[in-house]
Amino acid sequence: MTEPELVIASSPTDAGISCWDLHTGAEHLRYRTCSSPSHGLTCVGGRFLASSQLRETKSSTGSILYWSWNKPQVEVKSFPAEPINPLVANSEGTYIAGGGASGEIYLWQVATGKLLKKWHAHYRAVTCLLFNDDQSLLISGSEDGSVRVWSLIMVFDDLLRGKAKQPYEFSFSEHSLKVTDVVIGYGGANAIIVSASEDRTCKVWSLSRGKLLRNIVFPSIIDTIALDPGEDVFYAGGRDGKIYIASLNAVADPNNNYGLHILGFLSEQSKAITCLALSTDGSLLISGSEDGMVRVWNTKNHNITRIFRHAKGPINNVVVVRQSSLMSNRGTVNSQMPSVKRHGLSLPPPLEKCANSADENDYKAVIVPRIDPDRSVEASYISIQSLSNQILELQRQGSSAAAEMEIERLKLDRSRSMQMIQQWETKFQSLHQFCVTELLDGEKAGNA
């Protein structure tokens, strides 16, 4: 049975947020007052929606808004030190990261709203942010054309950062123009990264080797990409209204009309494709467009199965959320967080504008537990070990957040395991079909 999933879409114009059931098409609550930048909409641990906002005036610093699942009005408003463009939460919903117009990256603790860290990440505005699958790394893209990989343990460990030659793990600078989107596969420190740029290329990077694996040139500027769960192909949304299908393994016919490594495209003569997302099992591709439509594509036969219409204006963000995670979090997580009382709801407090140095120093003992210097630990596992130690430290202090983090981590591990099983089943079926075909063709040739 297909797990219920929600499609959530927003617009750069003040058209609110639309929400639909992906599989039935039923419209859920429509949220008011939202003018989000690209990559500025996120679901925080299944608990609530958060979005950065475009500046109303040049003198405005911008804002970050929270919505609960059962009310259309904005519940919490935060006013960071500068306009925030991309906004992302880790899978457990314990941290929110935002990319500033100045090139700064901000990292907040959700439960308290504390600004834990900020650092100068790029020379120009940050355009996209995401965590990797084990939450140990933060990847950023920028208008300066670079993609950088940040170790969270290094971000918090001043001593470790001081010994490093540079503050980041890798800096990929082969793009010649603004980076428009970045996605990452499974595998922790061994995953691949795919980046898109206004230079009309998508580049595939090896996270373990820190090298460029493949450069794919497209007929149009690519603003958004989505990576298939099996990591055989990725989808690239172009400003020409086409969704290109690019291969990560096989090489397409070099004589085709699309280009090397491009297998084909999906199109319904829409305006520019601005955002893409995939269902959990990868069977459905969701695209948002400047024409204000959200289209759902079957990735097997490439047909449109459903079309949603936003209230008004173009679409620039599409997020897919498992409905079961929302149900499990509505009644349990909120009770463990500081409340915003004025609406009778239990949402986290607003995010801090500036860090409190005293609080920051107190918190570092929890974020960065001591690591035995005599014990050899591989770099790719340091962050994971530290996050586990953080949970233990919170448990010693009797924090209810520790139990919450542990439960969410177990749920995430189970979800990843199920996805991996589905991917292996798909690969096995494809391999089995290939072997059967080869065997039958061999028998036919022998009989002839």
Image (cartoon, rainbow, N blue to C red):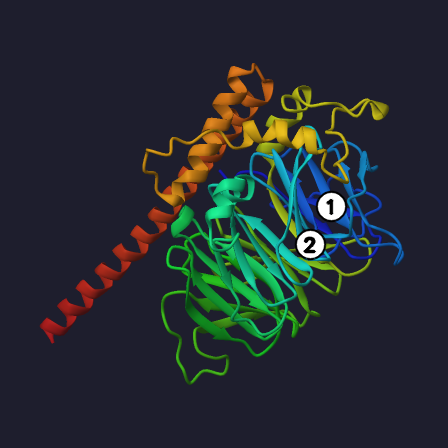
Identify the residue at horizontal 53%, vertical 52% (top origin): 167
Report the label total. Answer: 2
Considering depth in this image, is 35 or 295 the residue closer to the camera?
A: 35
Q: Is residue 165 above or below residue 49?
A: below
Residue 292 rendering spot, x and y as whole percentages: 75, 60
Which amino acid type is marked by label 2? Asn
Q: Can residue 414 be seen from the camera position used here?
A: no
Residue 415 rendering spot, x and y as whole percentages: 46, 37
**Residue 399 appears left or right of 101:** left
Name the image quarter holding residue 128.
bottom right
The quadrant of the image that shows the C terminus is bottom left
Name the image quarter holding residue 365.
top right
Identify the residue at horizontal 48%, vertical 79% (top origin): 259
Q: Reading the chain from its start, which is encountered first: label 2 or label 1? A: 1
Identify the residue at horizontal 36%, vertical 51% (top origin): 426
Q: Which residue is mark 1?
A: 51
Residue 10 rendering spot, x and y as whole percentages: 74, 51
What kind of element bears circle 1?
A: strand
Residue 389 rendering spot, x and y as whole percentages: 46, 27
Q: Which residue is mark 2?
A: 317
Q: Can residue 290 be seen from the camera position used here?
A: yes
**Residue 122 appears left or right of 188:** right
Considering depth in this image, is 154 or 246 the residue closer to the camera?
A: 154
Which amino acid type is marked by label 1? Ser
Q: Residues within 10 Å of mark 2 (few under 14, many from 20)?
A: many
Identify the residue at horizontal 58%, vertical 40% (top origin): 90
**Residue 235 appears left or right of 102:** left
